[in-house]
Amino acid sequence: TDLGELNFVMIATGFYLFAVVANKGVEFVMTFILWRLRCLVNHDISRSLFHHVCNLSMDFFHRNRTGELVSRLTNDTFGIGSEIYSLIFTFFRSLPVAAFYWLVLFNTHFVLSLGIVVLYFVSAGVSYVIGKRMRKALSAANNTLGDVGAKLNEVLGSMLVVKAFNAEVHESDSYGELMDQNFHNAMWVGVWKRTLGTVQSLIQSVTVAIVLMGSVMLTIAGELEFTTFILFFAVLTKVQAPSRELLNIVSKIQSVQGHARRVIKIMNERSSVIDGN
């Protein structure tokens, strides 16, 4: 009997190690594929945008400063690829785990699980509202970052003129004002991002408290077995992390839109000159 139990433990341990190694292997391959996809997206968008810009008329370049264009060609295209990678990676990593735990929850107690879903919809709505504000702050931060780049290009490209007119202090003060604006906008991006995480954690904590209280009342009333209560609560603690990551997809989509709008604005420009013809 002892030998049989030992064999069972060894087999179970072997299966566990195999599952862990297989899971990490699949995660590594998926990370590599998605990272390559992210680099390709950034490469193709940046190259297509640059080709489009090169074919625009001189009127476009008179209306847009070089530093601003550099910001859109680099920072925004990089941001689109980075956010898309994060979005897809989160979706594939968290969805299967969340789906499994939610299935267990609904099979354990349907009504309690339905109540949790309602509270998660509230969290999704909050994520959308905060994500929308974060998108506006991100667009403003990218705009002021473009202004900073334009100012650097303007001053460094005409340093001889700056020296000739003793305009170092004036240009330094102008640059400082732009940096202050960029700092203000970037700060609000961080504030909204951290607010989102805090609010989501608060809603999830309230959800756990409500479910715990309801489960205890049902258990006392005899409508819920104690073992079922323990199972339900244990699975509930496990489902929170992947569910929160899936909720963050809402804000990630908003971030992609914030970068994409600045790129689309250039792509909407039209020119009668294509490749010099």
Image (tube, rainbow, N blue to C red):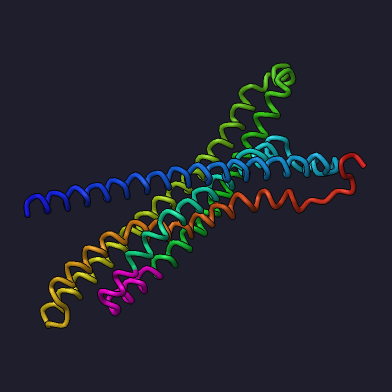
Question: What segment carries the magenta color?
Answer: 103-121
Q: Is residue 113 magenta?
A: yes
Q: Is residue 173 above or below residue 185?
A: above
Task: Name the spot of residue 116 as percent of width and height, x first.
Answer: 32, 71
Task: Judge left or right: residue 235 versus residue 138.
Answer: left
Task: Name the spot of residue 54 as percent of width and height, x first.
Answer: 80, 39
Q: Residue at x 46, y 55 (%)?
A: 92
Task: Judge left or right: residue 114 versus residue 208.
Answer: right
Towards the viewer: 97 or 168: 97
Q: Count how many numbered circles sit on residues in the image.
A: 0
Question: Secondary structure of the magenta portion, mostly?
Answer: helix
Towards the viewer: 71 or 229: 229
Task: Judge left or right: residue 165 versus residue 101.
Answer: right
Towards the viewer: 65 or 197: 197
- Residue 57 in which image quadrant: top right
Towards the viewer: 134 or 160: 134
Q: Is residue 269 above or below residue 236?
A: above
- Residue 216 in which image quadrant: bottom left
Q: Is residue 20 magenta?
A: no
* Figure quadrant of the C terminus: top right
